[in-house]
Image (spheres, grey):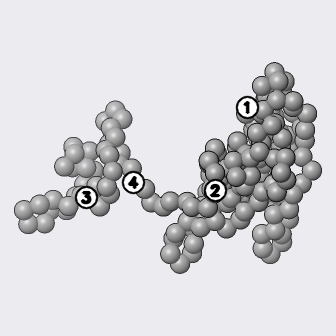
Amino acid sequence: MTSEAASSGSSVQLGKGTIEMTSYIEGPLFVAGSTSYQVSLESLLVGHNDWVYSVEWQPPILLTGDGAHQPMSILSASMDKMMMIWRPEKNTGLWINSVTVGELSHSALGFYGGHWQPDGRSILAHGYGGSFHMWRDVGLDSENWQPQIVPSGHFAPVSDLTWARSGQYLLSVSHDQASSST
């Protein structure tokens, strides 16, 4: 038993042995300072047909007052020219692909990254050649992700991008030594 588990009171004495929370999780134990962590694989997200280069949680939704709600949604972007939104299935809790968007063009070479707009209603991918691809959920009662007009201007691969905190502007930097705000 680790000293952290013993001090947290997360163990139960049964007969000769002690059962701890870490008894149910298989995986390496990591120690950072005086805190111990154990990590395990909860779910394997299967759906892309090529390398996945980006995985990102949906940003928290700000509630009235000081509160926030963290949606259980993950966005993945891949060189298979697809972005997928993953959510846990309500009955089983298994993570499933609930939305797939992508570029079917033969000229597209795949996505290096995908990002949520701060309000979670738009997603943006940046492609191999510096291209942008954006989709917005325009559905009222159900999700309906539609492609949108996207900013352009870089002549080399985009190395990073981020939304402004307001969600109205996008800043990108590229290997063409230019930055762009759109």
150 in relation to 33, above or below: below
Question: For residue 113, which numbered disc appears in the image?
Answer: none
Q: State the residue in front, 137 or 33.
A: 137
Q: Which residue is mark 3?
A: 23
* Disc number lying in front (1 or 3): 1
* Disc number lying in front (3 or 2): 2
Q: Which residue is mark 4?
A: 40
At 21% across and 43% down in the image, what residue appears? 3
Question: Under tag 4, what secondary structure?
Answer: loop
Callout 3 touching callout 2 (CB < 8 Å): no
Question: Under tag 3, what secondary structure?
Answer: helix
Q: Quadrant of the C terminus?
A: top right
The three-letter code of the residue at mark 3 reads Ser
Answer with mark 1 or mark 3, whichever residue precedes in sequence: 3
Q: Which residue is mark 1?
A: 159
Q: Is residue 97 left or right of residue 121?
A: left
At 64% across and 45% down in the image, what residue appears? 54
Q: State the residue in front, 118 or 123.
A: 123
Real-space Cα distance between discs 1 and 3? 42 Å
The three-letter code of the residue at mark 2 reads Asn
* Disc number lying in front (3 or 4): 4
